[in-house]
Every structure is written in C-alpha cells, then in structure tokens.
C-alpha cells in the first residue's frame, strides 16, 4: 500500500500506531506501520530511556514521537510557573473535588504525589525544549504536535535533522494554520476519536482537509480500528491512518486491568466529549465522574492546564483504588477512548492488531476494485 | 456497482437520494440510484399527487417513500389528539417563543396557519394508515421508517405487496430491534447526518451494524455527499449509501433561496444537534435561534410532538420574513442539514450531483483496487 505518507516515512503500510507504551510503539513499527510514542507523559530522562528501549528493538525501522505543545494556555510568572498556576485554582473547585472523593470513599494515596506539577512544568517552553533535545538526539523519523501548530523553532530543527513534522487538527482552519507553519503531514482527527477532539466527523473532515492540503499527505484519525475503516480512510483520500484508541485493547498497553475491563464492556455509545480531565474537550469513557461534573452544583471544569492540576491527584487516587476493586472508584474510573471502544472484545498483542488491520485493509481494497468493475467482491 | 442493495431494489448504483422534493426523487432514480420521497410533510391527497407526478417521469424505474412513524411520542385522547396535545404546552414556553419573535421583530403571517396541527394529526395511527394506503396504491419499491421500528402491520402489508421495508437507526441496539421487526434494509445513520441523529459517527456505526445484520443489506448515512465518501461507505461494508443533506444543494430542492444561501456560506463546524425544532435531537444549521434556546432563561425544548406544535408557526413566520430579506429573520432562519454542508459551493441539478457521485465512486474504487496491489492509484 504505497501512499505519499508510506513513501515519505519509508514504511510498508500507512498505519500509525499512537500510544504511550513503548511496547505498542515497537510492535506497530515491526508490523510494517509507524509506531509513535506519546511523549508528553514522560520527563526528559524517562523519554531518553524509552527511546533507547524502542530503538534497540527496531533494527533500524522508523518510529515517531508525539509532543503536546499547547499554543494557548494559562501562563504563570516566569520562574515559578507551577506555583502561580496553582494559585489560580478557585477554592470552590478544590472543595468540589474533595467532596466528590469523600462521598465515593476514595482512599488517600500512601505517599503524596506531585499532582500534575511535573507535567505542567514540562509544558513550559523550557520543558518542551528539553524533550525536543532528547528526541533529536535519537533517530525518530517523525515528530508530531498534538495541540496547535508546531512552533517555527521545532519546524526548522526538524527540517535540518531530516525529521518529518506532523500536526493534529480538528477543523479545516487548523489545517490551514499547520500548512502555513510548514508541516510535512496533516493528521485530520474526527470527533469520534479518543482524546482531544473537535466536533466534525472523520467522514466529513478527511476529504475537506485533503482538498486543501495540496501535496501534503493527510492521515485520517478517529473511528479507525480495523481494516475496513483503514480502507475507508484511504477511500476518503487520506494517505494513511493515525490510530490511538485501538491500542487500548493491546496486551502491551500500560493501562491497568480495571480500566481495560471497562473498555471491553463498553459500547460505542459509552463515550463523552468532556473538559473534566484536561480542561479542553477530549473524548473519554463516560462514567460516574461525568455525572458528578454535570450536577447542577458543579463548578464546571477549569481551562488547561488548571483542570489537570486540579484533578490529577484525584484521578490517581481513583485509579489506585479501582485497581484493587474499590466499588466507588470503579464507578468513577475513566480514561481517554474513542467510539471504536464498542468493538473491543478481547485483549490482543499489538503486533497482531496491526498486522490484521493491514492485511484486512489490503483485502478490502482488492474487493472494492472488483466492485468497480461489477465483479462480486472477494 | 452490484451490491446486495442494488440487486434487491434493481438499481444500477447503490445510491439513495432522500428528499421531500419530487424533482429530486425523480432525478436520482433517473441517474441510476433510488430516489426516496420524504412523505410525512404531505397530507394523503398531496402525497397521492406527488407519487403520480414521480411515476409519470420514471419510465418504470424504482423509487421509494419515507414515513415518520414515531414509536414513542406524547399521546392525546383518542378523537381529539391535537387539542389534547396543545393543552400540554406550558404557558412559559408560549411566552418564550412570543418574546423571541417580538425581539427580532418578526412580522405575523398574513393568514393564520394551523401550526403543526395537520402534521401531528398525520402522526396519529389513523393518519399514518391513510398515508400507507396511498403508498401501496402506487408502485413504490421501498418504504422506509424514519423513527423507530416499522409496526407489524406495515411489514406484513409490504411483504404481501413485494415492497422492501427499510428503517433508520443510530445505534446497534436500534438495528437489533429493526431486524426483529423483519426489515429488509437497515440504514445506519451517523451523528454527522442532518435531521434526527444519534451520537455515534458513520465510521464507527456502519461496520458495527454490518457485523450484526447478517444477510440484511446496510446503507450508510451521514457524512456522504461525494464519490469518495460513497466509496468509503462501501469500504466499511455498507451495501450502499443513503444521502439526505447533499440534495439541499440541488436546484430542484424546494427550500427557499434564503436558506440555500445560508447553506452555501456555512462550514462543517456550523451545524448543531438540537431538540429545538422537533423535540428530538436533530442536526441543523446553527443560528441565532439556537443561541436564544441556550440562554439561561430559556425554558428548554419540549418533547415530540409538542415542540413542533410550539414552534412551527414561528418557523413559518421566520422563513417568510427571511425570504424577503428581513434581518432578524435572516439571523434566526435554520433548517435540517448535516456536516457535509461545509462542502456546498454552488447549486447544481440533482441529476448531475447523483451522476458525479456514482462516477467518482466507481473511479475511486478502481484506484483503491490498484493500491491493494501496490500500483499507483489512477
């Protein structure tokens, strides 16, 4: 399946596997696709170790790295970003979260965590630069910007290093901004996707972006977890697919068993686009957590990055308790996931998922070719 | 493009054109697809005249009829459905709509209209039967149920007459109910569609429904307005496509010029799923009308059929004023439309739209066949 994207990255099949688990990233690349590591959850030294681990297992095959580089976020004073942001969280919000945890009887953590402070510090321009230093010290073939257009410094650094730059988008307007910033790959993410996502569906967004992208290859994201959906994305004019949610059904994915069980039980109607995890609309599993934030006495979510600073300790307490079967925590536990969760029936090795997507896509494309000439599909 | 649906209905291409305008219905059928008339907007005698007009122009080619047969709605006393329903509309809602029209200075209608009373009377079982009598007195090849599973009386009547029964759905659960009711065709409608629609996107819903439908052909609906999207639906396993919104860009569509102009100017971000027109969530153009209903002092929409009874006179007053360029009415005017509205650039003859979709789909399928064998697409 040679497309402009497959040729640009030197991969056999235009399938990107986006995930935070190095085990998933390597298996997708080894299956002939491109594994892309969600790097923002890691500190610079953690990321360095992850990329070493990945490269040792890839025999020179390409892989990529995804960074969250927010273009718009609340800003603190230079030098004390975290403290100045933390001071902006209203008392009402802190009380709401404390009360919620108390009513569900969620135990405290055994040791005090730093909340999202480390993550927020990493959003500081200096923190992002530190992560980029690690990326460019390795041989990633693609760097992706998950939120907003990549800054000129990243684009010029990547061009020098021969690294492709990708950027995610949810509207044609985002795509125009990314093209102006000089990206090499556009990732058009439909509303059905897990994580940060807009309102336009993949079926509509993909051809709209293809029509304005000129020679820049477009990957379709959102709603793609099998070979049929991959073939549909290619039919829409995409040069490949960017898949995130499907890897939450992979054995190598680092999510804990309790949330994977919830995913296996969920239907395609069980997700919600909510600002309660990150402060920006992100699709996730709908649970009691969202009912609580929808209550009439809820103060409503704060903007990025205040909301993750507000709730990250709570999410850790909930996850830890859910892992050991705590009933209240099990009700509340959630995580980012797209509508494809309804198709999850079992956990499988990531490599098997990737290979079956690629093989099924190829078979489906051949059958569609037969349909064009009025021969019955294979 | 011989699919199970094309074979069942005896059409050359598995493209359904769903519209209330007889001129669109005939042009889609003449282009090799299947025109389906949205019949609920008509009385029995109007429908009879429309079907005569359509059949005169089709030289025996097949066409279909779509009826709104709600399974759940507020019910009045037998014998005086309209009056008993009208009594259920709260004073607060009547005041809200009157105030809204006054603030936008929308002129009254020259003669008193009957509101949605005629339409509501047609929702009565007796009214639906009267429409069905007209349908079965003609030679429609397909009868579709737009809301809910078709009642056993309709299914048995259709089987006797050799007419295929289709039903629209927004979740796999709806699909199971329709299959149990004995439908011949499932129409899986994604959230991006115009009109009544659920939350699951076409990309996710279509293969889910295909997997549970067995031999029953599935049409994909929502987000399909060009040959690429039609090819994508076939890639997802659909036996064809059901298109509604795209015909609002047809010259033959009976919408007035003012709303067609708004559609041509709209982007794919300019729709909203709202209960303010019918009482059930339906995708439509987002306008000042929705801002008003979102205000903190809004009483919120009523259930079907109370909401259309509440607002239909208002919508007529707004439409009539918008047609002559009234500024307030132009701000408020809306109509059902899907996210594909962002692709509308000009009005075209319906037959040209249908033929280009079919031709482009065929070319795209051939190119995808080439991609499977690693030959560059045509």
Image (cartoon, coloured by chain):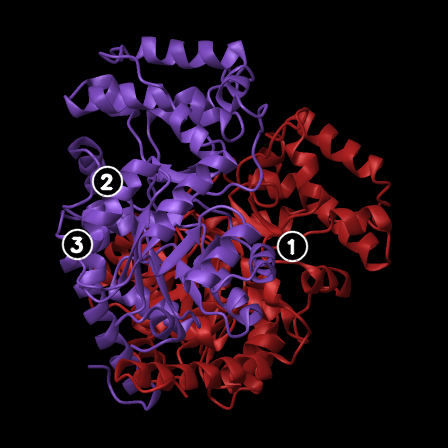
Chain colours: A red, B purple
Q: Residue at x 15, y 58 (%)?
A: B351
Asked if residue A315 lies left or right of residue A364, the reply is right
Q: Earlier in the sequence, mark 3 or mark 2?
A: 3
Q: Quadrant of the N terminus of chain B?
A: bottom left
Looking at the picture, how far across and down is residue A107, in whole percent? 86, 45
On the question of residue A226 being in view, the answer is yes
Asked if residue B355 lies left or right of residue A196, the reply is left
Placement of A26 over or under B270, stated as above or below: below
Between the C-alphas of marks 2 and 1, the distance is 37 Å
> For mark 1, what is the residue?
A335
Under circle 1, the secondary element is loop
Give the total number of marks visible in the rendering. 3
Callout 3–callout 1 Cβ contact below 8 Å: no
Q: Chain letter of disc 3?
A: B
Q: Residue at x 15, y 22 (%)?
A: B325
Placement of A71 over or under B355, stated as above or below: above
Callout 2–callout 1 Cβ contact below 8 Å: no
Under circle 2, the secondary element is helix
Q: Residues within 10 Å of mark 1 (few under 14, many from 20)?
A: many
Same-chain status of marks 3 and 1 = no
Under circle 3, the secondary element is helix
Q: Quadrant of the C terminus of chain B?
A: bottom left
On the question of residue A236 being in view, the answer is no
Label annotation for residue B56: 3
> For mark 2, what is the residue?
B263
Asked if residue B135 lies left or right of residue B360, the reply is right
Q: Chain letter of disc 1?
A: A
Looking at the picture, how far across and down is residue B275, in whole percent? 47, 32
Between the C-alphas of marks 3 and 1, the distance is 58 Å
Which one is in front, A98 or B152? B152
Q: On the image, which quarter does residue A4 sit in?
A: bottom left
Placement of B85 over or under A37, stated as above or below: above
């Amino acid at each position: 399946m040679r497309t402009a994207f497959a040729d640009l990255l030197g991969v056999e099949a235009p399938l990107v596997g986006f995930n935070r688990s190095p085990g998933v990233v390597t298996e997708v690349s080894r299956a002939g696709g491109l594994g892309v590591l969600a790097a923002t959850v890691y500190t610079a030294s953690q990321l360095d170790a992850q990329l070493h681990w990945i490269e040792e297992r890839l025999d020179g095959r390409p892989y990529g790295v995804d960074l969250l580089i927010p273009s718009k976020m609340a800003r603190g004073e230079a030098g004390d970003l975290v403290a100045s942001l933390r001071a902006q969280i209203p008392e009402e919000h802190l009380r709401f979260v404390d009360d919620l945890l108390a009513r569900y009887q969620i135990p405290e953590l055994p040791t005090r965590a730093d909340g999202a402070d480390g993550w927020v510090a990493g959003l500081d321009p200096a923190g992002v630069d530190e992560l980029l230093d690690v990326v460019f010290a390795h041989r990633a073939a693609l760097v992706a910007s998950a939120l907003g257009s990549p800054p000129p410094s990243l684009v010029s650094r990547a061009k020098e290093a021969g690294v492709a730059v990708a950027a995610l988008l949810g509207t044609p307007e985002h795509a125009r901004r990314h093209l102006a910033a000089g990206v090499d790959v556009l990732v058009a993410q439909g509303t059905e996707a897990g994580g940060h996502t807009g309102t336009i569906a993949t079926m509509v967004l993909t051809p709209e972006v293809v029509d304005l992208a000129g020679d820049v290859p477009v990957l379709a994201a959102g709603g793609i977890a099998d070979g049929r959906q991959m073939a549909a994305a290619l039919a829409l004019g995409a040069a490949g697919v960017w898949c995130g949610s499907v890897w939450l059904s992979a054995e190598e994915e680092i999510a804990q068993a309790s949330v994977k069980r919830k995913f296996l039980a969920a239907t395609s109607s069980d997700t919600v686009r909510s600002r309660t995890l990150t402060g920006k609309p992100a699709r996730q599993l709908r649970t009691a957590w969202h009912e609580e934030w929808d209550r009439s006495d809820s103060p409503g979510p704060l903007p990025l990055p205040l909301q993750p600073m507000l709730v990250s300790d709570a999410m850790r307490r909930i996850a830890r308790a859910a892992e050991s079967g705590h009933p209240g925590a099990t009700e509340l536990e959630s995580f980012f996931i797209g509508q494809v969760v309804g198709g999850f029936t079992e956990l499988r090795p990531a490599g098997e998922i990737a290979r079956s997507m690629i093989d099924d896509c190829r078979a489906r494309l051949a059958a569609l070719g037969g349909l064009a000439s009025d021969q019955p599909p294979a």
